[in-house]
Image (cartoon, rainbow, N blue to C red):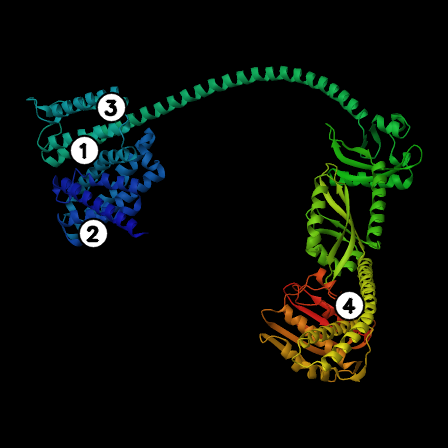
Amino acid sequence: MTQSGLRGRLAVIAFLAGLYFVAAKLGLSMAFVHPSATAVWPPTGIALAAFLVLGYRVWPGIFLGAFLANLTTAGSVATTFGIATGNTLEGLVGAYLVNRFAHGSHTFDHPQDVFKFAALAAMVSTTVSATFGVTSLALGGYANWADYGRIWLTWWLGDAGGALIVTPVLLLWSQNARLRLTLAQVKEAGLLLVALLLAGQAVFGGVFPITTNIYPLAFLCVPILVWTAFRLSPRETATATLLLSGIAIWGTWHGFGPFVRDPRNESLLLLQAFLGVSVMIALTLAAAVLERKRVEDALRSAQEELEQRVQERTTALRSAVDLLKNEVNERTQTENALRASEERFRAFMDNSPAAAFMKDEEGRYTYVNKLIEHRFNSKASDWLGKTDYDLWPAEIAKQFREHDRAVLAQNKTMELYETAPDARGDQSHWLSLKFPVKDSAGRRFLGGVSLDITDRKRAEEALRESQERFRSAFGSAAIGMALVAPDGRWLQVNRSLCEIVGYSEQELLGANFQAITHPDDLEVDLEYVRQMLAGEIQTYKMEKRYFHKLGQIIWVLLSVSLVRDAQENPMYFISQNQDITERKLAEGALQKSESQLRQAQKVESIGQLAGGIAHDFNNLLTVINSYSDMLLSEIHDHSPLHHGLAEIKEAGQRAATLTQQLLAFSGQQILKPKVLDLNAVVQNIMKLVRRLIDEDINLSICPTPNLGRVKVDPGQIEQVIINLAVNARDAMPQGGQLRIETTNVELDGPSSGNQSAMPPGPYVMLAVSDTGCGMDAGTQARIFEPFFTTKAVGKGTGLGLSTVYGIVEQSSGHIDVSSKVGNGSTFRI
């Protein structure tokens, strides 16, 4: 039990103890035969009602109240304990008997239970308290054994009166404390109350001067109680008897009423007997009236229910008749609809593009449509009643039968592919949908709809063969082929394309063609793609460059076409890539060779012309210079002619130098080659080179140890170095770096320079590099032409590089130049 529950129980026990104590003191105030025995004892009614309503567990409250009341009255603790025990057991026994035999707290609902209550609670259980109490007093010496009977009778009758008068009021009000009276009942109850008060005062109030003890006026109250019992409920009846009992006890105690005797105890005993009988009569009548009302209500409800059931049965019968009529009409309509449905079904199935049939559980055909008759050149009668074994070869019939059994066994629709020979004996293919069917009698059938897919099967086979041929041709094609998405992603590539670009199939499929296309070709390629997607062109072809995985450039001849779906939406491009790298290299080499040949022929022609002129001009200069020397030797320095002759001689010498350069360019000068160390030549000429270049030019020499020997004219090779150094100086007016280096080189295959091809083999290379302004391609093509110069007028003759070229060619060497505008130049010899 929870703490709050315990507190509540203790509060109830304390309340009962207090209520019992107050009622006991009130009753003991009217004790005459003994201080502990009274003819008026309401605590019995309180205890009995408490046990019936709250249960047996509240006995401590009754015991405590009884103990305190008797302890403060007379006797010892022992006698008080005995009396309290008797009072408690009286209530417990009475409650048990009423619960067991008189419907417990509902004992006042039936007349027979009222009598049982009076007998068990008022007559039997009260003997317990009287016996325990009087015996305890006698044993304790507080009562004479001679007075035992008189005390016991008073005790018992007082307890019985308390049970009959108090218990009904408490019990009935605890069951229903709400007043549910109509206005008429309220008025009637008020009238009854007034009548009861007047009658009580008339009988027990002493308001009349007559001697009432000789007249049976007490019975004036009985009609009022009977009236209350008939008109109101047992609760109001019990309340009226309690009110009348209070008036009667008060009047009798004060010497009024028909039951006044001497001694007073006898008056109270007579009054209690009268009240007990009156209460029994009133409560019994009230219970009988209540039961009669219940019976009347039950009869009324039963009658209403019976009438309702009769009405319902009548309505149901009428509805059944209507339903029967409707059912007959519906059945007629259903039969008509069924016939119409069957006709529609047959019309539908006979005009269906699919073969339709039905079989029973044994596999016998029960229906075939017109298509089957036409497709197999037969009649329906040729099929009905026969099995597949009667119509088809054994293997085909077995296949059909196994499919049918599987559908019926699994009781579900199945989609099956089946084959059968047609009327011509050709193999036909069917897509069959077979399903279980039950008729109204519960018989099982197998239904089927088969669609001829022979043409589709042939088309699928042709498509597979075509796809296989395409895959074979695609994979084994000698040119690179690919399927490319509209956004450029590789969808499928063949082995040849992978070999062309150096990437694996997985690497390409994870990228797009834009990633390996040369930037200079990408814009044109994408424009073609746009035009194809827009429908402006159907195909396109172009030469383009791919980047090989190893970094080199691959040239391909690209042919592209676009594949669209049935809705003309782009699906993918078919890309064909033919490797033309070797052809493009050959074309480039051919163009370069032709250019070199034309340049060489041009230089050779100029050289022959320059050589012829130089020889003739040199002969003339020899005469001029000789006579100039002779005249200068004969004229003294102060002669007016000396200065003019000196100028003639100087001009002749400059002209002679020019003719020597022309002879060097034309390769017609006399060389004196010898085997030498090129590093030594470079080292010897460096002092002169340093004087020729500006101070803001940084000169660096990079000779290679163990340099191979060469056979050249040392003076001519020095002239080459000087001319290249002067040319580099003029290209760096703001200063820069001049680098002269020598090295051994080994050419593994044919190589080419700007002027002539070099066969493979060992070479010694002399390189002169600068960080000057550089040259464009047009300038590089003409730098070795005589008299070609980019310098201002009067700043150069245009023969410096021509002389270098002539000396190198006459020395069986090769010269090459590489230069970019703004990045300087490098001459390699």
Whether tag 4 and tag 2 are in contact, CB under 8 A, the answer is no
Disc 1 versus disc 4: distance between alpha carbons? 156 Å
Pointer 4 or 3: first along the chain = 3
Frontmost of labels 4 and 2 is 4
Q: Residue at x 14, y 34 (%)?
A: 268
List x then y, in percent, for residue 499. Answer: 79, 60
Residue 317 vs residue 228, the one in the foreground:
317
Mark 3: which secondary structure? helix
In the picture, the disc for residue 228 is 3
Q: What kind of residue is marked 2?
A: Phe
Frontmost of labels 4 and 3 is 4
Quadrant location, the C terminus? bottom right
In the picture, the disc for residue 423 is none
Disc 2 versus disc 3: distance between alpha carbons? 42 Å
Residue 330 vs residue 216, the one in the foreground:
330
Frontmost of labels 1 and 3 is 3
Pointer 1 or 3: first along the chain = 3
In this view, 176 is above or below 765: above
Q: Residue at x 18, y 54 (%)?
A: 78
Residue matched to label 2: 81
**Residue 664, quarter of the rendered image:** bottom right
Residue matched to label 1: 272
Disc 1 versus disc 2: distance between alpha carbons? 27 Å
Crowding at dot 1, Cα within 10 Å, few <14 / some 14-19 / many 20+, comes out as many
**Residue 349, quarter of the rendered image:** top right
Crowding at dot 4, Cα within 10 Å, few <14 / some 14-19 / many 20+, comes out as some
List x then y, in percent, for residue 500. Answer: 78, 59
Mark 2: which secondary structure? helix
Pointer 2 or 3: first along the chain = 2
Mark 4: which secondary structure? loop
Q: What kind of residue is marked 3?
A: Thr
